[in-house]
Amino acid sequence: MTSSGQIKRHPNGLQHQNINDNRGFSALIVVNTPALDDSGVSHAVEHLVFRRSKAFNHAESLFQLTALTDLSINASTHYNVTYYHCHSQCLQTCLLGLNYLFNGLLAPEFVTQDLAHEIYHDDCYGVINRELTPQQGQANQQRVIDRSDTSAQRCYQYGGDLELISTLTLSDITRYHAQYYQAKKMYLVTGNIEPTLIDSLLESINDTTKNDVPYCPKVLPKAYFLEDEHYEINHFETDHFEAKKQLFRWYIDEEFFAYFTNNYKSLSHLIESYDALLISPQYNLNNKQQFALDIIAPMHCSETVLSQALASFLLKNPEDKSIRKKEKPNKFSPEIIRLFNYYQRLIRDLESDLASNLNKELNQGLNQNLTKKQSLYSNKQTTLVLGHGSVYPLKKQPLIKQQQTKKPIPLLPVANLLLIQLSQHLSEGKHQQSEYKHRPLPAVLSPLLIQAQQQLIQHQEKIAEVFDPNHCLILININDTEQNLAILTSFILNAYPTFIASRTQGHCYAIASQYLIDSHHLAFYSAFDVAPCVRFLAINESLKSLSKDLQFIAATLPLAKSKLKSVDLDDVTDNSVAEFISKHMLANDA
């Protein structure tokens, strides 16, 4: 891996470093996005950046890019930073993905309807709502802790709290974006993409975002609380605290996070001997780069006793306390991890250079006021002094709004159009894609997959439909001779606006069609769905629509074929795809 020169600063202020290693084409964009409250505004902006921009103004654009090319594109929000990234084996495809990202980052289109579909609306709809609901259910201890610590140094839930994220407005999104999404504040690392190509992309983007009003942080709202294990609603005139429990919290420097994570099990046994509960540490830092160590204990426990117990453990187990946690965002592919690692080394080198320059100035006596700045880049302490913890009354479990039980709201009609840039991409006619990589279904669907496979075997059926309270799955038997046709059809279906409308309109967190090569099944699934039991009907209706939409099939089939490199697909036509859908996917249709 070699660098192609010094850090390039593009005319709009974007800093850029390219590396050459002959491992495809990739890009990582780093945006500083501090968590200012529990609203998850940085998480919401990440979703809306992908939603639409002035150049890519349809909610389906992202899904069509990934369905009809080998482009991999994603983002990951953390406590103080958001990473956007993409990669492809084809340079032009990667540049198309990077163009999509740049437009979303620098010239997004924020509209009220997208806030409803992508974030939250009608109690249980909205993509982020569907994502957070299983994490923040009735038994979630972290929501209780967040409401118990009201100090200024607390760590915020950067992913968002359901009660606060539902209050985000268009003004909140616009202000936060304008405050932090500025090209001069971003950093770009690319793999095998020279700066001149980036210049060409950036020249076409007119960043007109102007907003001098900063985002105003929100405060967790007062809410009804669950009384006890019976989950009765508490009234406002009663006490909102657990009768016999309290929260003990210590704020500890980030460099010791790995130590407490590695020793969590041993520490848990120790704390249990005091009839108390040690909460698993979260890598979620406050503005002093500290994480919280939390213990929930009865009222008769004292802070002094627990602090002494922890201090004694630290003395008996001193090894490895200073080993830093190596943060690798879990959404990174191997192609992007190499860019992330390079970026981390680059930042450390820059900090080291700055520390060296500061030391020179200090030695020359030019600026005594730089002492504080120098400390930011000096080596951190390697000995932990725990100190006293803070004590808070433990609030009761806040009430989560119940999922709707009535008939779900209908999907809105959509225009089944292909992204213009994909049509242009195809017309170039010279960009072969990489070999399609088969992958297993998401792990969260494993129980349903087993259930569907058993249903196919036991009942000798061609199609199985199964669901649980959060997900649904359709499984179809496919003959070996029709494997490639099934794969092509899944590509086209994943790009079909009517099919993915459940996702783009916030009825689920994800919906997709996927061929399972190991078992020769074609799968359709909807994950974290607001109404899994009725999603089968919507999927079936979209299949009917696609089987008759020869215009869309004709527009997408050449792109779909390009994803199956080295496979003879000359005999696959628009009509054969439509016939395959009608014959195999609608077999149970009355």
Image: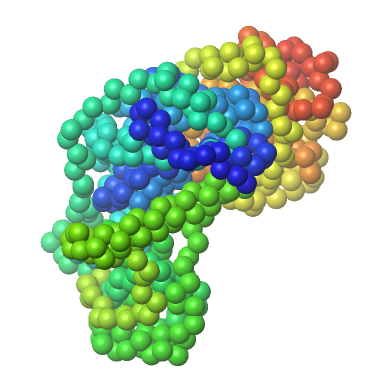
Which corner quadrant of the image does residue 457 belong to?
A: top right
> Could you say where residue 568 lies in the image, as x and y percent from the top left?
84, 22
Q: Tell me: residue 154, above or below residue 531.
A: below
Q: Tell me: residue 182, above or below residue 489.
A: below
Q: Tell me: residue 423, above or below residue 484.
A: above
Front-lying residue, 358 or 561: 358
Task: Say which residue appears at 27% left-offset and 33% top-offset.
Answer: 178
Which corner quadrant of the image does residue 424 belong to?
A: top right
Q: Tell me: residue 563, above or below residue 514.
A: above
> Could you say where residue 258 lies in the image, as x and y percent from the top left?
47, 70
In the displayed structure, does residue 271 sit left or right of residue 528?
A: left
Task: Say which residue appears at 30% left-offset and 50% top-offset.
Answer: 35
Viewport quadrant of the C terminus: top right
Front-lying residue, 188 or 84: 188
In the displayed structure, does residue 55 sit left or right of residue 64?
A: left
In the displayed structure, does residue 348 sit left or right of residue 147?
A: right
Colouring scheme, one of rainbow, by chain, secondary structure, one colour:
rainbow
Extreme residue in the top direction: 551
Q: How many marks?
A: 0
Extreme residue in the left direction: 237
| Residue 52 in sight from this viewpoint | no
> Could you say where residue 511 lies in the image, as x and y percent from the top left?
56, 35
Task: Say which residue appears at 60% left-offset and 24% top-offset.
Answer: 92
Front-lying residue, 373 or 428: 373
Which corner quadrant of the image does residue 463 belong to?
A: top right
| Residue 107 in sight from this viewpoint | yes
Front-lying residue, 134 or 203: 203
Extreme residue in the right direction: 481
Task: Say which residue appears at 21% left-offset and 47% top-offset.
Answer: 218
